[in-house]
Amino acid sequence: MNLGRAIVLAVAALWCSLAAVAVSPGVSPGPDVRYATDAYPGFDSEDELLKPSRKTPRWFGWFNGPKKGTAAEQFEYAASLELEESWKSAKKEYDALVREWPTSPEAAKAQKAVADICLGKLLDAEDAFAEYRYLLDFYSAQCSYDEIVELMYKTAELMRDEGKKILFFRFDNTVDVRRAYEAVVLRAPGAKFAPQAMLTVALLREDEDKQETAATVYENLRSMFPNSPEAVVALYREAKARMVVLRRCEYNRERVRDTIGFLTFAIESGKLSQEETEEVAQLRVEARALLEEEAYKAAKFYDSSTRTRRSAVSAYQRFLDEYPTSDRAPEVRRRLFELQEEGK
């Protein structure tokens, strides 16, 4: 790379760092809107994501590089290929412009053209999303931020519907799609579709069989957008996700109590439908039964040859105080009577 090109790329990097702070009016933070730098529990961390790197001229520039001598001429040439419906060639030439002249006035327009061709003509939602993301990450001040973010959201929706294509086959691409929705939320936390995008992230976490993480996203969604329709869905889904976690994990009394408290909150919120309320009430019955079973086992633990009679009596008495109507109450009362008689 010659010195001139190195200087151009250095200036481009500086420009991108400045452009990245630009926020469009439609998604700028305001009352009840979070900043994109805020924490999003349940989202993949930045360290887990592959960050797009700056496009640079390709090897074998005589073959892969731009066909014209200036950015303006190259843009006109790529546009002519697009008019001829030579979509792949047009995309290649627009991309070559972005790589060769990243700071030119035509670069942002060319980058958008690359993304638009991927989406509308080549029907490749995954590549389109990556190109729109690149446009926002490197040219946020030179494009319509709101428009591009909404295109990213719509493209993520297509990715979810279509799946990932490898050769002639399509496969589930849950992780890639989830990260696409996360990228949309992080770049436009105040957008109208942010609650739905977060709800989708949580649902996809469930598809990954990570209910505990899904519950975290549902909780964050309810906190961020408490009056949204998605918050009501999140309340119900979180209740179910918490119970899945409760059934899977080793017994933890505090976890059970916390889950019962949340289920009670969900029931008393008045936001669930009648059917959902009844279902959550049944989940609470199940959770309470887990708590009762643990209390019974704890009492039985003290009723052994290695424990004192006084400890066993106290444990059984505590169980009856807490669960006087339990199905195990008659059995516990009989054993408590026997221990009290033995002590006389």
Image (cartoon, rainbow, N blue to C red):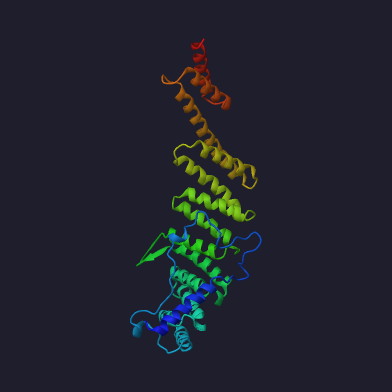
Q: Residue furthest left?
A: 60
Rendered residue at 49%/14% (across/down): 338
Residue toward you, 101 or 144: 101
Q: Is residue 307 above or below residue 26?
A: above
Q: Is residue 170 above or below residue 4?
A: above
Q: Position of residue 164 (x, y in %)?
A: 41, 64
Q: Position of residue 106 (x, y in %)?
A: 50, 83
Rendered residue at 51%/80% (across/down): 109
Q: Is residue 18 visible to the viewer in this orientation of the structure?
A: yes
Quadrant location, the N terminus: bottom left
Rendered residue at 55%/45% (across/down): 239
- Left or right: where does residue 339 sit relative to residue 263? left
Residue toward you, 73 or 279: 73
Q: Is residue 326 above or below residue 281?
A: above
Q: Is residue 94 visible to the viewer in this orientation of the structure?
A: no
Q: Position of residue 63 (x, y in %)?
A: 34, 84
How many marks can you see?
A: 0
Q: Position of residue 61 (x, y in %)?
A: 35, 83
Q: Residue furthest top?
A: 344
